[in-house]
Amino acid sequence: MAVLVTGGAGYIGSHMVLNLVDAGVETIVLDNLVTGFDWAVDEGAKFVLGNIGDTDFVADLIKTEKIEEIVHFAGSIIVPESVEDPLKYYANNTCASRNLIQAAVRGGVKRFVFSSTAAVYGMTGLDPVAEDAALNPMSPYGRSKLMTEQMLADVAAAHHMVYGVLRYFNVAGADPEKRSGQSTKAATHLIKVAAQAALGTRDHLDVYGTDYPTPDGTCIRDYIHVTDLVEAHALLLENLRNNKQSLTLNCGYGHGFSVREVVDMVKKVSGVDFEVREVARRAGDPPAIVAGATRIREQLDWQPRHDNLKGIVRAALDWEKYLRTRNR
């Protein structure tokens, strides 16, 4: 039995590959390397260059490699960009996922895990949001992900396939052994950008909006370490194998930090007082979104080991330092 990881050369996908390879699972990586890096793919996995939207190509890959499970990370993820270029997101996220799912059905794939997002909820307020909350995404990014969730539900009802959906909150940090991390130079993740500012890769950091209805006026997010996130994927796959029932779960810690709090932590850990500029809000950003995290702990017995903002920031800073030496 082999597992196909789409987007396995990207940030989260490469960490999932590490998890699977470490567990001795036969792992196939499919990535087009538009945003990923071939060097980020662990040598214990087989790398295949290609597009998830090419149904015939993927169907042949599933047959040749005897793939029974897919963990799907490939897609576009920047909320403001999705507002500016929605068709890109419906093409890369929704349409390509539709073709991937078709190939999975054709190839008899038994289990499918999908990388979704907390952006499917939209405006939520300051309280943690549970999986049964109203779904009202504020951006094409969130809507493109929700459409894929809905496709999976319909396909699972019509075919012999079970699926798992993990709605991510804000992923940060890097592999504790420094084997992978967030490597995109133009990434928009707050902790990544703040770490770059602290190390001089950027000359400043922009804070988008300081007039939100939150305690300090900046957005609040639930930051989750990438290693805990991929462990949740591994537990979800195991659950699908044993119980054969589809699941949709939030993946976050259940508490949040404001933009100002994160910036202050990066300054504290790095020892650098970098420049911060306050600018206008970005389109598509809700004021606050924090995971209702009870269900994932109960259903998967998920016990995160890195629920510590200081540790997450330290891991991100260490990875940025590593990238500086790698890129010389």
Image (tube, rainbow, N blue to C red):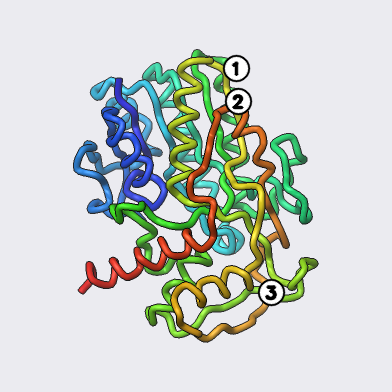
Instruction: Between residue 124 and residue 84, name the one nearer to us.
Output: 124
User: Which amino acid, by three-letter code, is at mark 1?
Assistant: Ala
User: Which amino acid, by three-letter code, is at mark 3?
Assistant: Gly
- For the residue labelled by badge 2, is the local secondary structure a helix, a strand or a loop? helix
The residue wearing badge 2 is 153
Residue at 64% x, 58% y: name it. Answer: 221
The residue wearing badge 3 is 209
Residue at 55% x, 38% y: name it. Answer: 166
User: Which amino acid, by three-letter code, is at mark 2?
Assistant: Ala
State if disc 2 and disc 1 touch (CB < 8 Å). yes
For label 3, count other residues whose C-alpha is less than 10 Å away and answer few (under 14), some (14-19) or many (20+): some
The answer for how far apart the CA atoms under marks 1 and 2 are is 6 Å
Residue 9, disc:
none
Query: How far across and how far down the image is residue 306, in percent?
Result: 49, 50
Instruction: Between residue 45 and residue 325, name the one nearer to us.
Output: 325
- For the residue labelled by badge 3, is the local secondary structure a helix, a strand or a loop? loop
In the image, residue 22 above or below residue 93: above
